[in-house]
Amino acid sequence: TVTVLVVRRKIRFTFPPRRSCATRRRALLLWAPDCIAPGSRLQGLCGAPDAPHPLTKIPGGRGTGRDLPLSVPLHKDERLTVTQTGSTSAAPTILHFQYQLSERRFSCWDTVLAGDCLYLEIPSGALPEGSKEGLTSLLEFAEERLKVSYVFLWFYKTREDRLSITRTFHYMGFEMVKPGHPLVPARPDVLFMVYSMEDSSSDEE
């Protein structure tokens, strides 16, 4: 459960305990827009391929819950599948990216779309072989279809593979985010990296 408290349009972020990969979506509501209600929580976004996603519950102001639709498909091609959960103004836009690496393997990225920014957590454990291709496909979709300006990723500083992750994503065009950046929370235990679509477009020109 992630609690998001809204005070004068500023969001206070509360990180839940670290859990298994199956529940890494715990951090998604960190990036919820201001309209999300205090005490809101998201459940069951990520799962096995083709598994149905449970309903998302958004508590109402009078203590009653409201059901949101199941994941809605946004895009599907030979390798990339994108689905969305949370389609009302009272909920964040949750996007689930699944990239087919082989017949039985895929990389999975859970993200939140907030304004012109897309946020994602680097899953725990070693990145699967071919996951760079999946992230490249995600970046292309974010730029061409979502029209975002920035893609932020984050991971805990305590990860043993921190330096390897930093080098890998720096090579892909991500830059370290300096402390005090207005689009990310102040967390001394977390590292953030950002990919700027504007810089990418300038390089192509």
Image (cartoon, rainbow, N blue to C red):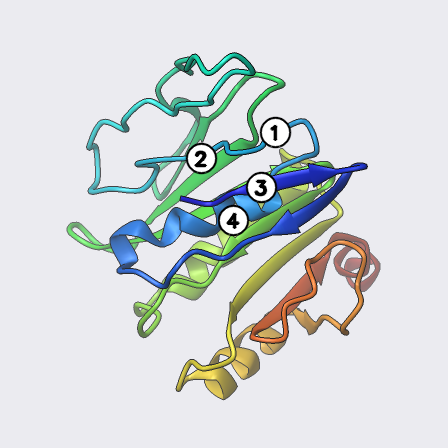
Residue 36 disc label: 1
Which mark is first along the chain, 3 or 1? 3
Residue type beneath disc 3 = Val
Residue type beneath disc 2 = Arg
Is disc 2 placed on a helix, strand or loop? loop
Q: CA distance from mark 1 to mark 4?
A: 25 Å
**Which image quadrant for residue 128?**
bottom left
Q: Give how far across and how far down residue 44 sits, in percent.
A: 30, 36
Tally the numbered discs.
Answer: 4
Residue type beneath disc 4 = Leu
Q: Which residue is mark 4?
A: 138
**Which image quadrant for residue 160?**
bottom left
| Residue at figure coordinates x 57%, y 31% from the top left | 92
Q: Which residue is mark 3?
A: 4
Q: Is residue 48 left or right of residue 120?
A: left
Is disc 3 placed on a helix, strand or loop? strand
Residue depth check, mark 4 versus mark 3: number of the one nearer the observer: 3
Q: Which residue is mark 2?
A: 41
| Residue at figure coordinates x 35%, y 37% from the top left | 45
Q: Give how far across and how far down residue 177 sits, in percent.
A: 72, 70
Q: Is residue 51 above or below residue 178?
A: above
Q: CA distance from mark 2 to mark 3?
A: 8 Å
Q: CA distance from mark 2 to mark 4?
A: 25 Å
